[in-house]
Amino acid sequence: MSWTHRASARRTSLLAVAVLTAALPVGAVAGPLSAASASAVAPATVSCPGPTPAPIRLRDFNGDGRTDFAVFRPSTGVWYVSGLPAVQYGANGDIPVAADYNGDGRTDLAVFRPSNGTWYIRGVGKIQYGQAGDVPMEGNYTGTSHLQLAVFRPSNGVWYIRGFGVVQWGECGDLPVAINAPTGSKLVPAVFRPSTGIWYVKGVKPVQYGTSGDIPVSHRYVGTTEQLAVFRPSNSTWYIRGVGAIAFGVTGDLPAPGNYGGGNHIATFRPSDGTWNVRNGPTVQWGTDGDIPV
C-alpha cells in the first residue's frame, strides 16, 4: 500500500499533548529546513489548553493491504500486532508512529520520544527531529515514493517537514490532520479548529464541518477521494461529509477507521476491554486497558 493511501488504513488515539502558545493566524510560509531546524524554536510561555489527538496512521504490518489490529503498551514499551510476535520497542512516554519508513510496503515499528525530539525506527535507526510538545505527522508530502518525517508544533502553528520545508498552517488549539491532496498523490497540511468546527486544508477553501469536542477522522469511507469527517464522543456518532451521520460506538470508544478487509470501515477501539469493533465486520479482542491503538 502506497503512502498516498495513508488515509485508507489509519487510526486515531487520543494522546494528550502539552500545547503552549499564543494564537497565530492561519497562513503559509515556505522555506528551507535542515535536519536540526525543527528543534530551533524555543517553547512559548503562554498557555494554550486542550488535548491534541495523534494522527491516524497506516497500520499494515504484514503487507497484505489490510489494516491490522495492533496496540502499543506504554507501561512496557511492547507492541502487540495480530498474527505477529510481540516486540519490545519503545518506553513509557513515547508516541507510537508506526509507518512504512523503508518503502517495502510493510509498516515498521517506530516511536517518537517527546522528551528529546527523537524518532526511533526499528530497522532504520534514530533521527532527532522535533522537540517536546510537537505532534508527529510523518507522511508523503512530496508525492515521491518515500515518506518524510514531520511534526506540527502547536506553540507556533508551524509544520516542520524534513527535507521539504516549513509551513505555517494553524494556530493555538488546532488539531493537525494531514489530508490527501485532491490528486491523491501526496499529503497536504490541514487542521481542524474545534472552537469553530472549521477545517483549514492548505490550497482548499475552509469548510465548516463539526463542533467543539469532535475528533477529526478524515478518511476514504466511500469512493476514491477522502471525505472530511468527525467522530462525536458525546453521542458516539460519525459525521461524514457527503455521506451523513452514522451512530457507531459507545462512550469512551476511540475512532479507528481502516481497511479491515472488503473495503474501508468505520471502527472503534474500546480501551475499557481492549476490543476492536468494526462496522459490518468483526469484533476482536486485542489489547487491554491502557494500551494505545496503532
Image (spheres, rainbow, N blue to C red):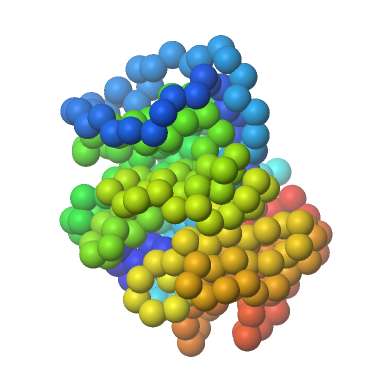
Q: Is residue 18 visible?
A: yes
Q: Residue at x 47, y 61 (%)?
A: 228
Up/down of 114 relative to 265, above or below:
above
159 relative position to 153: left or right: left
Quadrant in the picture for the N terminus? bottom left
Percent x, y of residue 241: 50, 67
Percent x, y of residue 197: 56, 48
Quadrant in the picture for the C terminus? bottom right
Up/down of 145 relative to 260, above or below:
above
Percent x, y of residue 18: 60, 29
- The one of 213 and 279 positioned closer to us in this rendering: 213
Q: Quadrant of residue 210?
A: bottom right
Q: Residue at x 38, y 73 (%)?
A: 63
Percent x, y of residue 246: 65, 74
Q: Residue at x 62, y 84 (%)?
A: 281
9 relative position to 161: left or right: right
Q: Quadrant of residue 5?
A: bottom left
Q: How many marks?
A: 0
Q: Is residue 83 visible?
A: no
Q: Residue at x 18, y 28 (%)?
A: 32
